[in-house]
Image (cartoon, rainbow, N blue to C red):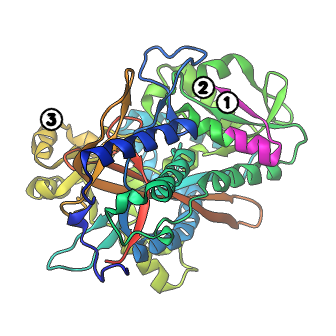
């Protein structure tokens, strides 16, 4: 049976009996535990050597997503890869938008610390022009007015610690397995194998790391993963490590900032980075995106030591700053996008621009007043990653009452995306006592597209690639969306017509 000409999102998911739901949950959780779709349990502090694991939070059904918009998101990724690579190489632009003299850094201590350290390193003379980005561009479906077709709208662009690539690949495999094993009990007869798009994110992200490692070109060098202490999402990182070793014969060192304080050194002549006696080709940051990772000046000093070295950074401080929400907002101003994509056909640039909602800064009183007037349709965002940082709707006016005028430059206002109404799914989370029952709730699903870019060489070119995707699904009543912060579950795509 062919798909309907226009998919009814409000009819998803199809109904299951209690017996079918219990069976599907058993199939899903045992598959997840058998195939590395795992998290460490919520225990504090985490033991040094893990002695147990739980399945990652997951959905039982894939989430419907229009095939034409999935293709659009993938098509846009190459332009986004190029755009953010070029922003990271534009020192003047980043100084004006994110710096401590003109930009956000003068009122945001975290951004200011990073920018000030970066400026000092520039004054010393940075020795590694190459930069690596492992990116993820996140989107929601947007339902327009008057029965307009659904459109694709960007939530944010991630330039540091773009996580869940490997677990998203396993979640897509989970849903393909459930379809193959159960046909979802024929609850949705129109479902076909071709509706489950392939997901090879692990190999794609590792290809980016391996490309940087090859560009460094020092025999027996290793890649450094900078990680957070007590990380529960460790398997998502380890699967990259295993792929690097098994497919590329590249070894990985994992250390926290505190461990690096004692182990890391930079050769005064060659500026090579060493961990003990091992040279590092590439520094991959899975930490360093939040002020909590820098509880004292010591952690900042370690970050700057790594930046000072000849190792290729993923990301550099410049690329991390390029991922700031203020940059995302400034790009919407007239002529700014064209500054970076002047060699891209205008029609393609407009296609990228069409993925944006309205945004503005709170720098001036007019911007703050507009945020008050339109509060029910807005989200306010600071320059932070990791979830749990934004201010929504009715909470905006009282928040603005407490926000000192000088600090408003660190925030942007963004029009809320309006996902299709009435879409549901069955969500399954595991706690320290084991799996919970599947819970059916109305949901919102966020698509992330992964890409990588290696850039900054003498030719000024950008080597880049789109490499995979993820879906994170949350209850509709939850404003935030992070899996690691407990708001979302891992999901995948069912391609539909809309």
Give the residue furthest to the right: 219
Q: Quadrant of the N terminus?
A: bottom left
The boundaries of the magenta stretch are 241-256
Q: In the figure, is residue 342 to the left or right of 183? A: right
Q: Is residue 141 above or below residue 291?
A: below
* Badge 2 element: helix
Name which residue lies at 44% across and 38% down.
Answer: 29
**Discs 3, 1 touching: Cβ within 8 Å:** no
Crowding at dot 3, Cα within 10 Å, few <14 / some 14-19 / many 20+, comes out as few
Q: Which mark is residue 402?
A: 3
Residue designated by label 2? 301
Cα distance between the residues tagged 3 and 1: 37 Å
* Badge 1 element: helix
Q: Is residue 194 above or below residue 115?
A: below
**Which one is in front, 21 or 157?**
21
Residue designated by label 1? 305
Name which residue lies at 57% across and 55% down.
Answer: 88
**Which one is in front, 55 or 353?**
55
**Discs 2, 1 touching: Cβ within 8 Å:** yes
Q: Is residue 332 above or below residue 60?
A: below
Q: Position of residue 343 (x, y in %)?
A: 58, 80
Cα distance between the residues tagged 2 and 1: 6 Å
Residue 411 at least partly seen: no
Q: In the figure, is residue 277 to the left or right of 300? A: right
Q: In the figure, is residue 59 to the left or right of 167? A: left
């Amino acid at each position: 049976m062919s798909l309907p000409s226009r998919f009814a999102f409000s009819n998803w998911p199809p109904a299951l009996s209690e017996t079918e739901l219990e069976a599907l949950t058993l199939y899903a959780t045992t598959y997840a535990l058998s195939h590395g779709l795992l998290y460490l349990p919520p225990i504090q502090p985490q033991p040094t050597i893990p002695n147990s694991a739980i399945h990652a939070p997951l959905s039982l059904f894939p989430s419907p997503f229009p095939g034409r918009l999935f293709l659009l998101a993938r098509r846009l990724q190459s332009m986004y890869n190029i755009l953010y690579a070029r922003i990271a190489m534009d020192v003047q632009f980043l100084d004006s938008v994110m710096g401590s003299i003109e930009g956000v850094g003068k009122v945001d201590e975290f951004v200011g610390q990073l920018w000030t350290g970066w400026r000092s390193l520039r004054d010393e003379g940075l020795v590694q022009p190459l930069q690596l980005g492992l990116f993820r561009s996140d989107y929601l479906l947007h339902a327009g007015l008057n029965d307009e077709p659904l459109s694709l709208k960007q939530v944010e662009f991630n330039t540091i610690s773009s996580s869940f690539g490997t677990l998203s690949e396993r979640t897509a495999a989970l849903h393909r397995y459930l379809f193959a094993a159960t046909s979802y009990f024929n609850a949705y007869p129109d479902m076909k194998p071709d509706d489950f798009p392939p997901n090879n994110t692990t190999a794609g992200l590792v290809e980016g790391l391996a490309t940087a490692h090859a560009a460094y070109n020092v025999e027996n060098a290793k890649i450094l993963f900078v990680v957070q202490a007590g990380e529960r999402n460790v398997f998502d990182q380890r699967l990259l490590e295993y792929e690097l070793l098994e497919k590329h014969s590249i070894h990985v060192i994992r250390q926290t900032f505190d461990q690096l304080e004692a182990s890391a050194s930079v050769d005064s002549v060659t500026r090579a980075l060493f961990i003990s006696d091992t040279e590092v080709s590439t520094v991959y940051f899975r930490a360093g995106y939040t002020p909590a990772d820098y509880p004292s000046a010591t952690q900042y000093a370690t970050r700057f030591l790594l930046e000072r070295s000849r190792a290729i950074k993923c990301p550099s401080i410049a690329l991390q700053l390029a991922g700031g929400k203020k940059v995302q907002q400034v790009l919407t101003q007239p002529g700014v996008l064209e500054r970076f994509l002047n060699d891209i056909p205008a029609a393609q640039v407009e296609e990228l621009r069409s993925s944006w909602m309205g945004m503005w800064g709170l720098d001036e009183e007019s911007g703050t007043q507009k945020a008050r007037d339109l509060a029910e349709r807005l989200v306010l965002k600071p320059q932070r990653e990791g979830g749990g940082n934004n201010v929504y709707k009715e909470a905006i006016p009282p928040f603005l009452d407490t926000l000192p005028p000088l600090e408003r430059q660190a925030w942007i206002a963004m029009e809320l995306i309006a996902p299709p109404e009435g879409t549901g799914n069955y969500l399954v989370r595991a706690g320290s006592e084991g799996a919970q029952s599947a819970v059916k709730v109305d949901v919102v699903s966020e698509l992330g597209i992964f890409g990588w870019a290696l850039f900054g060489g003498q030719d000024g070119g950008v080597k880049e690639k789109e490499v995979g995707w993820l879906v994170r699904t949350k209850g509709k009543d939850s404003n935030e969306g992070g899996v690691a912060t407990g708001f979302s579950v891992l999901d995948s795509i069912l391609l539909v017509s809309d």
